Amino acid sequence: MSHLVAGIGELTTHDPARGTLQEAAVVVEDGRVAWVGPERDAPAADRRIDLGGRAVVPGFVDSHAHLVFAGDRSAEFAARMAGERYDGGGIAATVGATRAATDDDLRAALATRVTEMRAQGTTTVEIKSGYGLTVAGEERALRLAGELTPETTFLGAHVVPSGTDRRAYVDLVIGPMLAACAPHARWIDVFCEPHSPHAFDGDEAAAVLTAGRAAGLELRVHGNQLGPGPGVALAVELGAASVDHCTHLTDVDVDALAGGDTVATLLPGVEFSTRSPYPDARRLLDAGVTVALATDCNPGTCYSSSMPLMIALAVREMGMTPDEALWAATAGAARALRRTDIGVITPGARADLTVLDAPSHRHLAYRPGVPIAQALELDPARIAAM
């Protein structure tokens, strides 16, 4: 069945050939965009949906999320708001709760979080493991995540479990754990952060990423969150698709990103939730770096699934314009996943449309905290893979 989505007051396509259209329409067929243009020129379709002048943007692409977990860390959040410093140690609490949860518990919680994301306009999500930290626990997380998205990331190198020998744990990650998890993952990631005693240094991170690439996985990196470090340089050197956080960057880091293909994925919800300095997006953009935005939705440092909130924070706190922030949350994040079929509304792309209860995309930053964005469900019976 074909659908004519009409009555679009403002259509942001992120297609350079089309730009932003007024009084526009989109024809969707078999889950793909078949036609885009002025409504007056729209071809006939089997079904017409009139949006009454509302704005439409590409579905948000959340390229960094930790959704397979159990437990609650609100007390840790309260402690940080009272002045306690974040160093990554709270992850252990989530590991314990996640290990104790059943598959059905985790599956239900995961489905609820993904539904919550779609209700706020997100149509693609990357989901990491990282709260099992055993061979069976990591494999389970990726298997469950794979039921909802093809963008699954093996993050056995999230932290070194308490009481575990570091060298032995790295050997486990790049050996039996990687062998069990690679069939269920597209990506491998590592928390490269010498400023945390729980995370991995540059040499350890390089060993993890190199082993993952040899196993056929593509690379991502958590880097430069708590202070300057080797994460950005390592990501660029190894050709990682993205390096995420990028809160503390040297001029050398910025130059490396500008000269390579690695996307700088910024996670402003983390800074909001930890009272940390925000990344300087303006510095990166002015240098020619490709920037993405994502939620880093997780139980410890940013329990928010709202991409509109990330857009508002990027505009208010990180020097981005509303246009730049929307592009980073859609087309930029698609680049962080090395995808060309999402983040844009153009013929052949996936028909991921997010409708705004507003006349313009600028309202995403203009009305923070107001639920104006929602993914358009053309087929209510369809359970979309994110």
Image (spheres, rainbow, N blue to C red):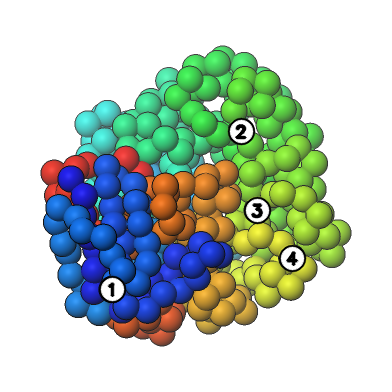
Q: Amino acid at mark 3?
A: Val
Instruction: Return the residue at label 2.
Output: 218
Mark 4–mark 3 distance (CA, rounded to whole Å)? 11 Å
Instruction: Return the residue at label 4.
Output: 288
Residue situated in front as seen by the camera: 343 or 262: 343
Task: Tell me which label, 2 or 4, sits earlier in the chain.
Answer: 2
Mark 1–mark 3 distance (CA, rounded to whole Å)? 38 Å
Q: Residue 263, which numbered label?
A: 3
Q: Amino acid at mark 2?
A: Glu
SS at circle 3 = strand
SS at circle 4 = loop
Q: Residue at x 31, y 69 (%)?
A: 41
Q: Amino acid at mark 1?
A: Arg
SS at circle 2 = strand
Which of the 4 quarters of the picture holds residue 102? Answer: top left
Q: Position of residue 139 (x, y in %)?
A: 43, 23
Proximity of marks 4 and 3: CB atoms separated by less than 8 Å: no
